[in-house]
Amino acid sequence: MSDTPSRHVGRTGVWLVGARGSVATTAVVGAAAVSGGFVPPTGMVSQLPEFAHSGLPALDDLVFGGHDVTDTPLSKRAEQLAEAGVFPAALLPLVVDALRAADADIRTGTTGEPGGPTQAETAASLIDDLTSFRQRHRLDQVVVVDVSSTEPLPVLRPAHQQLDTLEEALASGDATLPPSSLYAYAALRARCGYVGFTPSPGVRLPALRELAEAQGLPYAGSDAKTGETLIRTALAPVFAHRALRVRSWSGTNLLGGGDGATLADPAAAASKNASKRSGLDALLGEQVEGLTHIDNVPSMGERKTAWDHVDFQGFLGAPMTLQFTWQGWDSALAAPLVLDLVRFLARARQAGATGPQRQLGFFFKDPIADHIAPDHRLVIQFEELRAWYAGAVR
Ligand SMILES: NC(=O)c1ccc[n+]([C@@H]2O[C@H](COP(=O)([O-])OP(=O)(O)OC[C@H]3O[C@@H](n4cnc5c(N)ncnc54)[C@H](O)[C@@H]3O)[C@@H](O)[C@H]2O)c1
């Protein structure tokens, strides 16, 4: 972190990849509803008193746009979410202008299907979309957030390892990047900070991390923790600190909506399960028995339920269990974190921070590590966040 003076970040672009999805739409609705004073900022970490003097961009200084591969208008998506119960329908007329404004800044994205333009051509057009968005709205900076459908685990190729090899592969017309990483490449080339809200590879490929360093840009990820993993990272330290021995930790997740449908694909679910598991193993200090399942239950709509069962041993081998059930509205849990992450990352960039933003590990299931392994303990992560932003304005 550099010693830049305390200043407020000004107009900040929020470029959502997957801009017509449930999380993205709820983020646009939420920013307008909170900044208009129609609802309190419940669920927004960046609105806590701890960050009141951190120089974060104001909510009404956020300008939304993005890429998607469907063309359902945002107002229609917002109606569907209100009908599903994510937020009250009475909010819709109050945020209609904000939805219309964001809609006008959504461009057609890429699925990376073979047979179309080369990846280099696609990247050039994504970069162009980002640059003209920044210029059109006279933005101080733009943060790109991946909230699109989760991709399967990537097949790693030699070209993903180093920037010069990657750019040679792109120049030779070799389609090599998964879509999330093509978006991340475009974001970094267009000089935008980047947040990987999903478990997709995005910026994590070594070649792209190298590009972020070369461009002097901050990034954060991966896969926001909003439910089961959030509670796990709060509870697992209890066992470690009380010297209790966890023998198994099993979890079942039931969810519907677009995310549920995507995760019905075993390849996408494998990607999600890997990121869910990483913190638990680190917190318990060993791999314990137990699997995590994700089931698509369309009748649940936008709701999700996580049920966890922990089998543990106490003094003299006494067998005991902990169970918890977490029931939530998927997008109501995720959308405020999108707004938080944009505000925190924009502020970090203004303070001169580059590379992986360790202090934002608090928000993620699988925090991108810097040179020190991430700490998954929620309380410690919150303290890292608080201390960093207190330091950023000194
Ligand atoms: N809701 C949560 O609590 C939570 C927590 C962590 C991570 N996430 C992740 O956030 C993402 C979004 O979740 P959601 O519920 O909004 O899902 P969703 O299915 O409602 O939205 C995904 C959007 O991405 C778009 N999309 C798909 N492929 C694309 C591409 N190649 N380019 C551009 N857009 C593309 C889809 O058209 C859709 O509009 C998912 O990956 C999910 O795993 C959600």
Image (cartoon, rainbow, N blue to C red):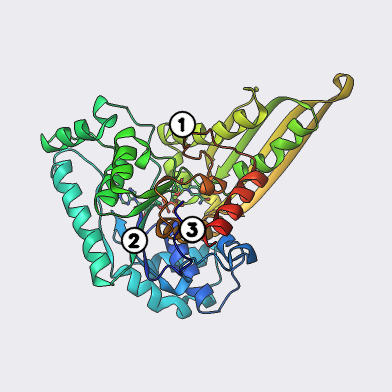
Q: Check whether the beta carbons of the residues at disc 1 and disc 2 lie within 8 A of each other.
A: no
Q: CA distance from mark 1 to mark 2?
A: 31 Å
Horizontal side, residue 125 vs residue 389: left or right: left
Q: Are marks 2 and 3 in contact (CB under 8 Å)?
A: no
Q: Nearer the viewer, mark 1 or mark 2?
A: 2
- Point 15% across, 33% down: residue: 168
What SS does tag 3 mark? helix
N-terminal of the pair, mark 2 or mark 3, is: 2
> 227 or 329: nearer the eye?
227
Q: Is residue 117 left or right of residue 191?
A: left
Q: Amino acid at mark 2?
A: Val
Crowd tier of the residue under label 1, counting other residues whose Cα lies within 10 Å: few below 14, some 14–19, many 20 or above: some
Asked where in the image residue 73 lies, by quadrant, the reply is bottom left
Disc 1, SS:
helix
Mark 1 or 3: the one toward you: 3
Dot 1 corresponds to which residue? 270
Does label 2 point to a residue whose CB lies under 8 Å from ligand 1?
no
| Residue 16: percent from left, percent from top | 36, 57
Residue under the point 43% across and 63% down: 25
3D distance between C-alphas at marks 1 and 3: 29 Å
Query: How busy is the neighbourhood of tag 2: few (under 14 within 10 Å), some, or many (20 plus)?
Result: many
Q: Which residue is mark 2?
A: 142
Pinpoint residue 273: horizontal percent, then vertical percent. 51, 33
Q: Earlier in the sequence, mark 1 or mark 2?
A: 2
Residue 129 % position (x, y): 22, 60
Of marks 1 and 3, which one's residue comes earlier in the chain? 1
Q: Amino acid at mark 1?
A: Ala
**Residue for badge 3:** 344
Q: Which mark is residue 221?
A: none
Q: Check disc 3 and give the amino acid type.
A: Phe
Does any atom of ligand 1 lie closer than 8 Å to the CB of label 1? no
Q: Residues within 10 Å of mark 3 (few under 14, many from 20)?
A: many
